[in-house]
């Protein structure tokens, strides 16, 4: 996380996407936060290895999460 935080400070991007986060429900949002960014995360199911994504959006952009209603779960069983 320190490397990501240093990179974000130097580059100052509006949006940062991270794949293969390996985060799971036992990892608290506070462990993944970046100052000045809102965190949106989608963890992989606990019975699977790897995966997960994190999306950081600059707080001043006032992003909101949209969860579409879907009748078709993804191939890993999450909706």
Image (cartoon, helix red, strand yellow):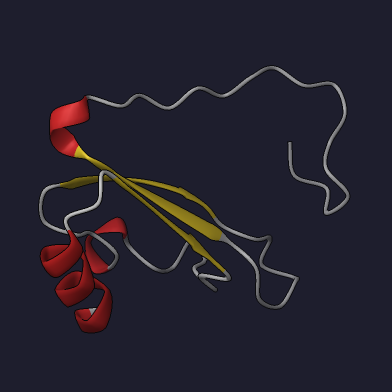
Q: Residue at x 19, y 63 (%)?
A: 11
Q: Is residue 67 left or right of residue 25?
A: right
Q: Residue at x 84, y 36 (%)?
A: 73
Looking at the figure, which quarter contains the N terminus?
bottom left
When asked about the image quadrant of residue 40, the answer is top left
Residue that protrudes farthest toward the bottom in the picture: 3
The residue closer to the viewer here, 13 or 32, is 13
Residue that protrudes farthest toward the top in the picture: 69
When asked about the image quadrant of residue 44, the answer is bottom right
Give percent across and percent down for residue 53.
Answer: 54, 57
Q: Residue at x 39, y 68 (%)?
A: 27
Give percent across and percent down for residue 46.
Answer: 66, 67
Give percent across and percent down for residue 65.
Answer: 43, 27
Q: Is residue 7 left or right of residue 22?
A: left
When asked about the image quadrant of residue 71, the answer is top right
Decide: is 43 above or below 63. Answer: below
The residue closer to the viewer here, 47 or 66, is 66
Q: Residue at x 27, y 74 (%)?
A: 4
Q: Is residue 28 left or right of residue 18?
A: left
Residue that protrudes farthest toward the front in the picture: 11
Decide: is 33 above or below 1. Answer: above
Give percent across and percent down for residue 6.
Answer: 15, 76
Decide: is 38 above or below 48. Answer: above
The residue closer to the viewer here, 5 or 64, is 5
């Amino acid at each position: 996380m320190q490397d990501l935080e240093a990179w974000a400070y130097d580059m100052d991007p509006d949006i940062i996407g991270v794949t293969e986060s390996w985060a799971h429900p036992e990892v608290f949002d506070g462990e993944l936060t970046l100052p000045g960014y809102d965190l949106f995360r989608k963890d992989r199911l606990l019975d699977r290895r790897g995966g997960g994504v994190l999306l950081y959006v600059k707080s001043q952009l006032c992003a909101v999460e949209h969860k579409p209603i879907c009748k078709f779960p993804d191939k890993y069983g999450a909706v």
